[in-house]
Amino acid sequence: MIFRTHIPCVVYFGLKNTSSFFQRIITHKFQPLMQKYEPYLSNYLNNWIIAMPGGNKGLTLHQRIMHEFLDLLQKLSYFLKLGKCEFEQPTEEFLRWLITSDGITMDPSKAEGLA
């Protein structure tokens, strides 16, 4: 008797847990890169951020991580929508948090609603 495992190549949109399935795939495929650059590279579902300290050293590291990330995307035949991408920004909003060279803070416009 032969048992075979079916590994899907596409996400089934009829699944109830598609987002967790997608997150598991991304975590598995990008694990080596995420471990190598753990403090700088982060994702949540299809949102990615590469954040590092300022200065020339930070910029060269950012560019190296970006090249490795894009090479891995190409190797895996994954695609980006360039209209949704922002590169080498001094300030960035990520999952409703404001990330700057000073650190991570809550977006002031979101904090006004709490008061």
Image (spheres, grey):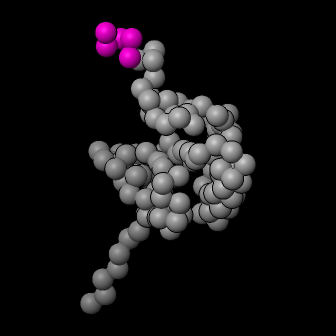
Highlighted magenta segment, given as a residue range: 111-115
Looking at this view, is 70 or 115 the one in front?
Answer: 115
Determine whether 77 is above or below 14 in the image. below
Comparing 96 with 85, the one in front is: 96
Q: Which residue occupies the foreground of this view, 91 or 14?
A: 91
Is residue 114 within the magenta segment? yes
Q: Is residue 64 left or right of residue 21?
A: right
Q: Is residue 45 rendered to the left or right of residue 36?
A: left
Evaluate whether residue 21 shows in this view: yes
Place of residue 18 in the rendered image (x, y in percent of width and height, measured from the top left)? 36, 47
Residue at image point 48% right, 50% down: 42
Horizontal side, residue 44 vs residue 114: left or right: right
Picture layout, residue 30 above or below residue 100: below
Q: How many marks?
A: 0
| Main SS of residues in magenta | loop
Q: Residue at x 43, y 45 (%)?
A: 44
Q: Which residue is drawn at 57% across and 37% down?
A: 101
Q: Is residue 29 visible?
A: no
- Whether 108 is drawn above or below 30: the answer is above
Return the x and y of residue 102 as percentages of the image width and height: 53, 35
Q: Quadrant of the N terminus?
A: bottom left
In-front residue for pair 69/26: 69
Where does residue 27 sit, x and y in percent of width and height?
43, 59
Quadrant where the image shows the C terminus: top left
In this view, which residue lies farthest toward the left?
Answer: 1
Q: Position of residue 58 (x, y in %)?
A: 65, 50
